[in-house]
Amino acid sequence: MLNELKKVITKRSKIIGRGYGSGKGGHTIGKGTKGHKTRSGYKEPRPGFEGGQMPLSRRIPKLRGFARGFLKIKEANETVTTTDLNKLNIETVDFKTLVDQQIISMKAKSAKIVLKGKLTKKFDIVGIKVSKGAKAVIEKLGGSVKWYGKNRSKNKKDTYGAC
């Protein structure tokens, strides 16, 4: 039994930065020579940092409609598929009902219904953009689509946020 045991050989990890006799280099210890990356406590600089030079996002002129990249607020336009509509138990669908039913997020600025999958119920869509294919299927099942341009519905107080 004892003669069947295998001898365990473990290799000791090299201790770096403790002189030439430690097993791994002396003075530069594999980090190269000089510079910020060789120092202890080095961290990657933040995105957009150019080593103290004026960053590109601050060099570009600030004109109307221009914002620095990380300050820009992106409009959240969400798509709703016809299979998502099948989950609803409501006949009339507007922007507020989509938010209330958690099909789109509250941060969404607008929504569009697109044809994906089969639609099995009749729906009356009010104040939401609808693709041509989805509109044809909704109207084929006896539903209707009402779109009021940029406004989500005739009464702005019914919806979240102003358009």
Image: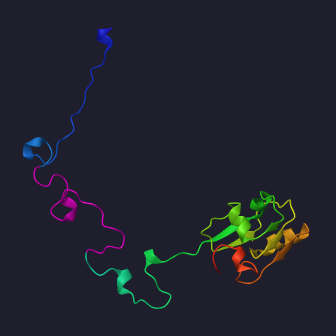
Residue 142: x %, y % from top left: 91, 69
Q: Residue furthest front?
A: 157
Which quadrant would residue 32 be assigned to in this image? bottom left
Q: Residue furthest top?
A: 1
Residue in the image at 36% along x and 69% along y: 47
* Left-right relation of 62 to 9: right
Q: Nearer the viewer, residue 70 or 27?
A: 70
Which quadrant would residue 152 be assigned to in this image? bottom right
Residue 68: x %, y % from top left: 43, 80
Q: Nearer the viewer, residue 156 or 150?
A: 156
Residue 59: x %, y % from top left: 35, 86
Residue in the image at 18% along x and 65% along y: 35
Residue in the image at 22% along x and 57% along y: 41
Q: Nearer the viewer, residue 88 or 156?
A: 156
Which quadrant is the C terminus positioned in? bottom right
The segment highlighted magenta reads 26-51
- Residue 64 falls inside the magenta stretch: no
- Residue 46 falls inside the magenta stretch: yes
Residue in the image at 71% along x and 72% along y: 112
* Left-right relation of 51 to 100: left
Which quadrant is the N terminus positioned in? top left
Residue 26: x %, y % from top left: 10, 50
* Left-right relation of 14 to 106: left
Which quadrant would residue 7 be assigned to in this image? top left
* Left-right relation of 6 to 77: left
Q: Is residue 67 above or below residue 134?
A: below
Classified by dominant secondary structure, the portion drawn in magenta counts as loop
Q: Is residue 127 above or below residue 85?
A: below
